[in-house]
Image: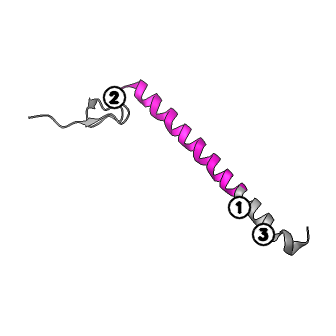
Amino acid sequence: MIEQHKHCPMCGTPMPMSEKFCSPNCEQLAVANQQKVKKTRRFLYVLFAVFILVWLFFMLKGQLKF
């Protein structure tokens, strides 16, 4: 029978259940990927906020007599 294991989330290599990644290289890649996702998410939130502010400006422009 196959002993219990899980697979590395980055490369899919079988590894022991107690480990998060199969190697330090995969761990570094995962951290870099998380940072990239965090940066992209932050950028999209700022972009969305800017679009809302621009929309509000044009919607209220006539009412505030700018």
Q: CA distance from mark 2 to mark 3?
A: 54 Å
Alpha carbon distance from label 2 to label 1:
44 Å
Which numbered mark, 2 or 3, is in the foreground of this view?
3
Tell me the residue at 18%/37% (across/down): 4
- The disc, 2 or 1, on the residue closer to the chain's N-terminal end is 2
Distance from label 3 to label 1 (Cα)?
10 Å
Say which amino acid is labelled 3: Met
Above or below residue 50? Residue 62 is: below
Which residue matches tag 1?
Answer: 52
- Residue at 51% over, 33% down: 32
The residue sitting at the bottom extreme is 63
Compared with 28, 57 (above or below) is below
Most prominent secondary structure in the magenta stretch?
A: helix
Task: Tell me, yes or no, whether the highlighted magenta stretch contains residue 26.
Answer: yes
* Of 5 and 48, the residue lying toward us: 48
Mark 1: secondary structure: helix
Q: Which residue is mark 2?
A: 22
Question: What's the residue type where badge 1 is placed?
Answer: Ile
The spot of residue 37 in percent (x, y) is 53, 42
> Vertical placement of 41 versus 27: above or below?
below
Q: Which residue is mark 3?
A: 59
Label 2 element class = loop
Quarter of the rendering occupied by the N terminus: top left
Q: Which residue does the image show at 66% across and 55% down from the upper left?
A: 48
Residue at the extreme left of the image, as rendered:
1
Q: Residues within 10 Å of mark 2 (few under 14, many from 20)?
A: some
SS under mark 3? helix
Q: Position of residue 38 (x, y in %)?
A: 56, 43
Q: Tell me what residue is drawn at x 12 percent, y 34 percent.
A: 2
- The number of numbered badges drawn on the structure is 3
What range is drawn magenta here?
Answer: 22-50
